[in-house]
Amino acid sequence: MTVRAIRIFGDPVLRATSSPIDDIDDGVRALVQDLLDTVELPGRAGVAAPQIGVGLRAFSYNIDGDIGYILNPELVEVSGDPVEVGEGCLSVPGLWHAAVRYPHAKVVGIDLDGQPLVLEGDGLLAQALQHETDHLDGRLYLDRLPPETRRTAMREVRESSWF
């Protein structure tokens, strides 16, 4: 079991667009295992590869005890009226703010066998799918905050002990 350290706000890997996975090799298999091991810890809904320092399009999720992963995920559908929902991020520890998310989301990608994989859901799963695909595009949930809330959050970042 390899639980990887989470990269924190300010690390350039969190702001870079992740590269697609072209070849599923032992390195990618090890990455997936590390993502699964890392997301299993209590209180974690998802971990994207950039959060453990890897600039590849992959993430793991842990929603209500359902743990899995997806490679090369693309957010292909969101629906419903966007709403502000409480959100935090392992890469921005200690902060919790209302981010704007859609109540339903669908992601398509592949598994370790190269077979198509679809993840779709509402509520927390929809939020996690949007949050983790944002990570793969170099975005943090702070980017989704309304302007005044974002200013407050950025002040909290600057004043945090980890920044």
Image (cartoon, rainbow, N blue to C red):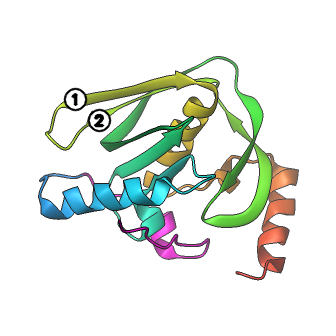
- Where is residue 114? Give x, y as percent: 15, 38
Name the side, left or right, on which 80 lies relative to 12: right
* Residue 122 in the image: above or below residue 140: above
Q: Residue at x 40, y 49 (%)?
A: 59
Q: Is residue 39 visible?
A: yes
Q: Residue at x 12, y 53 (%)?
A: 23
- Please provide the residue range marked out in magenta: 1-20
- Where is residue 47? Give x, y as percent: 48, 54
Q: Residue at x 53, y 76 (%)?
A: 11
Q: Is residue 143 magenta?
A: no
Name the side, left or right, on which 158 lies relative to 80: right
Task: Find disc 2 in the rendering and name its residue.
Answer: 109
Where is residue 3, by image quadrant?
bottom left
- The crowding category of the residue bearing disc 2, from other C-alpha atoms within 10 Å (few below 14, some 14 to 19, many at least 20), is many
Name the side, left or right, on which 117 lies relative to 88: left
Task: Find disc 1 in the rendering and name its residue.
Answer: 116
Q: Secondary structure at mark 2?
A: strand
Q: CA distance from mark 2 to mark 1?
A: 6 Å
Decide whether the magenta segment is chiefly helix, strand or loop: loop
Residue 144, label in figure: none
* Residue 77 in the image: above or below residue 101: above
Quarter occupied by the N terminus = bottom left
